[in-house]
Image: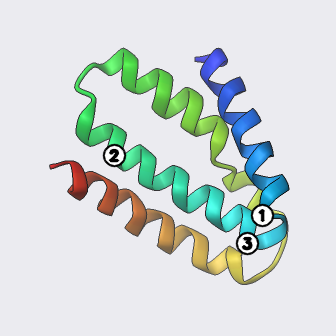
């Protein structure tokens, strides 16, 4: 899982360079949540889900970073992330 976390962290950094600030955190967290929903709907194997979900997508999403800065993203991100995860799961089932 640590390899997945490292890969996710590198992907998060790359996307945060392209979309900086609160918008970047918002996009990263909502996209990561959507992908977690897709993963849960498509992958039946627990160890594969752990590698990609906890490792890679856990390293990609950055809820701890968004919580330290006060902005509109502090309120919008959790709601949009939950909706995105639900949509990702619905798309796959």
Check contact, mark 3 vs mark 1: CB within 8 A.
yes
Does 26 appear above or below 92?
A: below
Q: Residue at x 47, y 33 (%)?
A: 53
Q: How far apart in space, not on screen, are marks 2 and 1 (Cα)? A: 23 Å
Q: Which residue in the rendered view is the most extreme toward the front?
A: 18
- First in sequence: mark 2 vs mark 3: 3
Q: How far apart in space, not on screen, are marks 3 and 1 (Cα)? A: 6 Å
Q: How far apart in space, not on screen, are marks 2 and 3 (Cα)? A: 22 Å
For residue 61, side relative to residue 17 (left or right): left
Quadrant in which the N terminus appears:
top right
Looking at the rendered structure, the secondary structure element under dot 3 is helix
Residue 33 location (% of width, % of height): 48, 53
* Label 2 Cα crowd, 10 Å radius (few <14 / some 14-19 / many 20+): many
Q: Residue at x 43, y 55 (%)?
A: 34
Q: Quadrant of residue 36?
A: top left
Residue 14 location (% of width, % of height): 78, 45
Residue 6 location (% of width, % of height): 72, 25
Which numbered marker is on residue 19? Answer: 1
Check contact, mark 2 vs mark 3: CB within 8 A.
no
Is 13 or 78 nearer to us in this picture?
13
According to the picture, the residue beneath numbered tag 2 turns out to be 38
Q: Quadrant of residue 8?
A: top right
Q: Residue at x 31, y 60 (%)?
A: 86
Picture mark count:
3
Observer-side mark, 3 or 1, equals 1
Q: Quadrant of residue 29?
A: bottom right
According to the picture, the residue beneath numbered tag 3 turns out to be 23
For residue 78, side relative to residue 75 (left or right): left
């Amino acid at each position: 899982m640590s390899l997945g976390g490292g890969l996710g962290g590198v992907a998060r950094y790359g996307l945060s360079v392209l979309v900086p600030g609160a918008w970047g955190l918002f996009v990263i967290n909502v996209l990561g949540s959507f992908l977690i929903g897709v993963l849960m709907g498509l992958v039946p194997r627990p160890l594969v889900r752990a590698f990609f979900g906890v490792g890679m997508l856990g390293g990609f999403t950055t809820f701890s970073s968004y919580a330290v800065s006060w902005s509109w993203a502090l309120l919008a991100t959790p709601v949009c992330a939950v909706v995105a995860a639900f949509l990702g799961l619905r798309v796959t089932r």
